[in-house]
Amino acid sequence: MKPTYEELEQRIRALEETRDQGQHLEESGRRQESLVQKYFDVTSAIIVALDREQRVSFINRRGCELLGYAEEEVLGKNWFDHFLPARLRQEVQEVAEALFAGNAESVSYFENHVLCRDGSERLIAWHNTYLRKEGRIVEIISSGEDITEKKQIRLELQEAYNIINRSSSVAFLWENSEGWPVKFVSENVEQLTGYSAADFTSGVISYAEIVDSDDLGRIGHEVEQAGNDLQHDDFEHEPYRIITKDKELKWVTDSTHIKRDGQGRPTYFQGIVTDMTVSKELEQERLAVIRELEQVQRYKSLNVMAGAVAHHFNNMMMVVMGNLELLQRDLPDGSQASEMAAAAQESAARASQISRSMLTYVGQHHPKKEAGDLSALILGLKGLLRSNVAAHIDIQLHLAGKPVVCEMDSGQIKQVILGLVLNAGEAIGEGPGQIAITTGYSQEEMNSLPAPFLNGDLTPGQYAFCEISDTGCGMDQDTVARMFEPFFTSKFMGRGLGLAVVVGIVKSHGGALLVTSAPGGGTKIRLVLPAHDASPPAEQADSVSAAEGELPSFAGLVLLADDDKMVRQVGIQMLELLGFEVVVARDGQEAVELYRDHQERLVLVILNVSMPKRDGIAALQDIKAMNPEARVIFASGFTREHIPLREQDKAPEGFIQKPYQLQNLAQAIKEVLV
């Protein structure tokens, strides 16, 4: 049966409605697709879809911009062949194959580099999924984020963190509260403190607990001051000490940055704490070396000064002793005036001996040693010791029953013993006391010498000793350790010869001083000198009273050169007493000129070594150039060994050390002329 017109009309209207609905749905789909495309284009993420042949089926605008291609240049291209570095293709293809196989979970996130048009590479973090059609995976869809810069920053931060952990610097974050709790600390804190990072961050120990108690107050004050200074957020502590878990003391530096709240109050402190123990120790060693060099320089200055003083002093004593000797020759024997002149001469000679002791200390005089008896030497000093020590102090001698023989310069050792006894008297002070002097032989181990003798060549064995003990105030060990220093003084050292000079004399004899003392317990100083097997020689006349007798008689003209007028005057009188005529020069240049004028008559030249214009050494060379046979004697306040003759210089025939007496001068001339 054919449809009626009305039925056809209804069908047509239904078809039109269906058509309209389809058009509406199609339009809606197009609108949805357009919205998705716009979303894909405005997102900062890279969107890429690959089909099963690994070709690009979709890429958004951000992906094209990153790769540097237009969309049509990417679509349909094999992703791995065109847009991945060759070194990564196999690895990333294996990821894609795992996705197409349905194993999405294991590779839902993956990082790899992509290759851009300009040859550069960018690191992309991908989140992967896929589309199915009829149960089959047909496309992989990946959303990527360019993390190239982030990765670089992370790597740099990690490297910085590694650098910190490999260094002696530890990064801290402290909370601004009591004890400075640690909120963060780098792992290398254990190398510095012995405590782990967890020990600090868990509150097992606070930072304040490891700061040395002597420095804690200062550190807290510095933190408070810095926190109150709103103009600056960075400060540095003065170096301070921390105590490690093993109770080791370490020095650290601390550079700190302050984090503040809205009101400017410190909330946290970020700091870098650096171990500077080694550098601190090196600095202390450097300062010690500087102090030692300064001390050495002071010693050198003292040597120069002592040498110069002794030289000038000897010149003055030459005048004093020479005039006293000449005066005594004109006085009647046994007269009071003669005795007074003799006493003055004896004191002058002893003063000269002290000057030689000073030169010995500074290494400018070598002692003239010979076998001698320490006991006999002390017996000879008994009267002098008694007269120089206060009457209320008892002096007791405990001398060995047989000679105590050693090699010594008797004059210098007398000065040493006199100096030690005077020091003992100073230690006793005003009250009653006792000084005991003991001599003998002893076996010395030499294994606990005081500092001045530590580097000597002293060996265990038999030594002759003279021990001086007193009942004085005694010394503590710090004083004992420093008592031999040239610039150290205490009331123990008073009127006597300085102990530093005593050390110089004793060392030049190959001996040592051993000290035992305690506060309130007195002091015992043992002088030990290498023992000598020979018997002591017969007692000789002391230098203070030179052997008298008939003076030898000479004749001829003598040239005497000295820059000191009074020395010249004494020298003229002595030479004239010996029978000479004398011509004098005030300096080396004048001496050379006078020798040129009188060389036919001159039988002897006496040259002072240190003179202006031309010194004695230079004058000698000129004189020897004129006459190689000229007979010359050097005179000096220094010893012969310390006259700076060069290898090529001509040497004099004789030497005499100032101050000298007439008999000494006669002997020196006799050795040269006869």
Image (spheres, helix red, strand yellow):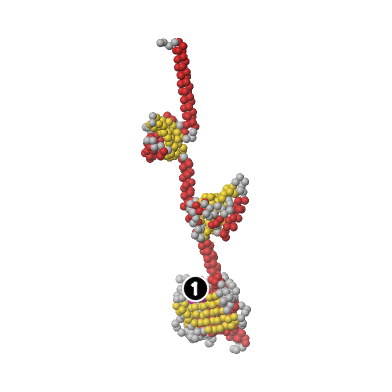
Picture residue at 46% right of the left edge, 38% below the top = 146
Amino acid type at mark 1:
Leu
Picture residue at 40% right of the left edge, 35% below the top = 83
Question: Secondary structure beneath disc 1?
Answer: loop
Judge whether residue 32 is colored magenta. no
Dot 1 crowding, Cα within 10 Å, few <14, some 14–19, many 20+: some
Q: Tell me residue 84's x, y (percent).
A: 40, 37
The quarter of the rendered structure image containing the N terminus is: top left
Q: Nearer the viewer, residue 197 or 441?
A: 197
Q: Image height check: is 236 above or below 592? A: above
**Residue span colored magenta:** 511-515
Judge whether residue 512 is colored magenta. yes
Residue 384 visible somewhere in the drawing: no
The residue that disc 1 covers is 449
Q: Image height check: is 385 above or below 91? A: below
Q: Tell me residue 318's x, y (percent).
A: 57, 78
Q: Tell me residue 216's x, y (percent).
A: 57, 57
Q: Nearer the viewer, residue 479 or 541?
A: 479
Q: Main secondary structure of the magenta part?
A: strand
Q: Nearer the viewer, residue 246 or 487?
A: 246
